[in-house]
Amino acid sequence: MKIYKQGATAYIVDEGRVFRTNSDWDLLINRAELHRRLREDCSGFERVSEFDASGPFDPPVQHQELWASGVTYLRSREARVAESKSAGGGDFYDRVYDADRPELFFKAAAHRIAGHLDTVLIRSDSSWNVPEPELTLFITSAGTIEGYTIGNDMSSRSIEGENPLYLPQAKTYDRSAALGPCLCVPEQPLSMGSAVSLTILRDGACVFEDTITLERMKRQPRELADWLLRALTFPHGCFLMTGTGIVPPDDFTLQVGDEVSITIEGIGTLVNIVNQSRQI
Ligand code: DO4
Ligand code: MG
């Protein structure tokens, strides 16, 4: 079952049938046993015959915070070690990959998140920028993982590489995150055999492409959620990016106009166009 958000309207697509509701988004999604409850709700929602699944769509967020995990795949560890070399490196990234406690950081408030077919930004004071394709969990206020969406954790490698203490600036700025195209609420947890793919088009030509499966993640979704919830409560639930397993080569940086597509098997494809934040 997939829920698409367009303004105040939610479209629920369930086994080929489409239902529409103007229910409050937070109340609609923040429920344990969400799949079963939505099935029950659909009998009271309006059934529609017209629905354009190509979008655009808002991110599946109203008052939820977006958090992110780091260095959960070997490829991410390698990339951070390389980018921080000129700043003296250190073994922080190696250590966090192996430690019990994962790297978790606040990524974005709802108003900073782009949706499907929306613009994402690179910072005008950053020279080295990449998208990070990440399975993103929806966790209810009761702590249950009820759904999944696709996340793009836009990142400045030059700012983080200069000093790891600059992580919040490398990771959090307007439209540094995209989520969508929908909130996928499956009956069973998403298979860790699912593939995550990233494609970057420049002037219509592919300049980067890669795929990885979720089982290459060092941590389990439940483990990441449990660490996040150790000392935080989320009255409306929250979203948690689970880290990237794909990083373009070190000589690659995003350019204005690039089209970034991220596909996760079972969820869909999130597409965003890159622009630059205003000059300072
Ligand atoms: O340590 C920096 C952030 C890592 C990250 O965002 C990732 O691994 O996805
Ligand atoms: Mg990331």
Image (tube, rainbow, N blue to C red):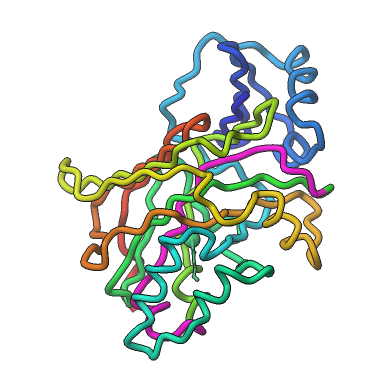
Report the span colored magenta: 143-165
* Furthest-bottom residue in this view: 88
* Furthest-front residue in this view: 98
Q: Is residue 254 left or right of residue 69?
A: left
Nearer to the camera, 61 or 166: 166
Q: Residue at x 43, y 40 (%)?
A: 270
Quadrant into which the C terminus falls:
bottom left
- Quarter where residue 160 is shown: bottom left
- Quarter where residue 155 is shown: bottom left
- Residue 124 at x, y percent in the picture: 31, 72
Q: Residue at x 31, y 63 (%)?
A: 276
Q: Is residue 78 left or right of residue 47?
A: left
- Residue 169 at x, y percent in the picture: 47, 76
Does residue 230 sit above or below 143 in this rendering?
below
Q: Residue at x 35, y 42 (%)?
A: 261
Does residue 46 sit above or below 261 in this rendering?
above
Q: Is residue 39 left or right of residue 14?
A: right
* Furthest-right residue in this view: 142
Quadrant into which the N terminus falls:
top right
- Residue 188 at x, y percent in the picture: 69, 28
Instruction: Give the number of marks.
Output: 0
- Residue 87 at x, y percent in the picture: 37, 89
Q: Is residue 184 magenta?
A: no
Nearer to the camera, 94 or 45: 94
